[in-house]
Image: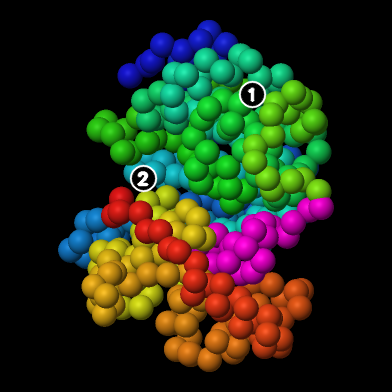
Amino acid sequence: MEHQTPTVFGSPQVSSPRSHTRDLLRYLTALAGHEPRGGLFEVRYRAFARGGSDLEDQRARMRRSWHPASAPIGAARAILELAERTDVYIGLAPRRHRHGGKSAIKRIWTLWADLDTPESTGQVSTLPVAPGIVVQSGSAGHRHLYWPLSAPLGIAEAELANRTLTLALGADGGAVVNAATILRPPSTLNHKSTPPAPVMLVTLDRRRHPVEEILTGLPAPAPPALTPRPPPDLVDRSGDPLQVIKPEHYIEVLTGREVPRSRKISCPLHHERTPSFHVYPTPEQGWTCFGCPRGPNGKPLGGDIYTLAEKLWRTEDFLELTRRLYDTFLPASPRRGAQPAAAAAAGSARSHRPRQRPPFP
Ligand SMILES: [Zn+2]
């Protein structure tokens, strides 16, 4: 199972139950940083419901538990117990309340990247600061790298820093740069393979570094820029701030359903056992349900934040729809709904925007 990897990574040490617990505690302590009281670890795990007939559906069902970030032993115990029978993940940024999205995050105490190719692995030695934590994720060749920070970052800064590291590594830039990302903690098992593959701590160096040091000399990725600081999740490209909210975010808020890594959820618009509602990475791609009745043009039902809210709230009054979306997602902003001209402009921009839909993944 072990791949050829640079010696900079070393190899996981022969493990015992005691070293498992110690590794996990050290890892959790790094993630928690100096988070003020009240911070929470979000532990997410795959639940295997009994009695149902659709195995796929059961596999997709995720559950969560919450543990104080100030006392990692509680989270560690829960993780070790769950890991014996299922896949376990942890929110890398401490949450301030019981919610898995970015709205629950105030501070981020580590940067991270997902290393998935030998080429990326080769790039690690070129970085100004070596990752303090390396976790072998249990998928062949995959390693998660972490850089503990001496001062916490906000969501936008942390995501930009993650993107910068990802770009420098030529690594996977997908959902993993997201501030609300969950990854597998060490001392657990990756149950995707048979027998389950261990998720192991390869390196742990407690030293924390300032973000400026970690990113020294690394080329910045394409905007968003660091300053002025955009609201979390938002980079205004189209002139309509609602249209730049990521689908996984607005879909979680509007439907109350967690978007898993598979990006498939049970459709909120019709009853189904096997998820056929696809959540794409970009606002331009939006969402598509392959289970809903098709439209008159024969295409699967899909769209953007407006079309989903329209269906869920059963309103065709565009001003009303816009006002409610602003209240929900942008409560501090001036309301488009109160300004008919602006709202109409947003509406026409929407209807003229060419839409691209990726094929069924
Ligand atoms: Zn549907």
Place of residue 89 in the rendered image (x, y in percent of width and height, measured from the top left): 48, 45
Q: Quadrant of the N terminus?
A: top left
**Residues in magenta, as a range:** 228-253
Label 1 sits on residue: 131
Q: How many marks?
A: 2
Identified at 53% across, 72% down, the residue is 350
In the rendered structure, which disc, 2 or 1, sits on the residue that comes first in sequence?
2
Q: Amino acid at mark 1?
A: Pro
Question: Marks 2 and 1, how far apart in space?
Answer: 28 Å
Tell me what residue is drawn at x 47 percent, y 82 percent: 310
Q: For residue 250: magenta?
A: yes
The front one of 278 and 261 is 278
Q: Is label 2 within 8 A of ligand 1 (CB to nearest ligand atom)?
A: no
Q: Secondary structure at mark 2?
A: loop
Where 117 falls versus 237 (above or below)?
A: above
Q: Which mark is residue 86?
A: 2
Provide the secondary structure element on which disc 1 rests.
loop
Q: Vertically, is 10 above or below 47?
A: above
Quarter where residue 322 is shown: bottom right
Please tell me whether residue 278 is drawn above or below residue 159 in the rendered image: below
* Label 2 vs label 1, nearer the camera: 1
Residue 12 visible in image: no
Mark 2 crowdedness (10 Å alpha carbons): few <14, some 14-19, many ≥20: many
Q: Position of residue 43 (x, y in %)?
A: 52, 50
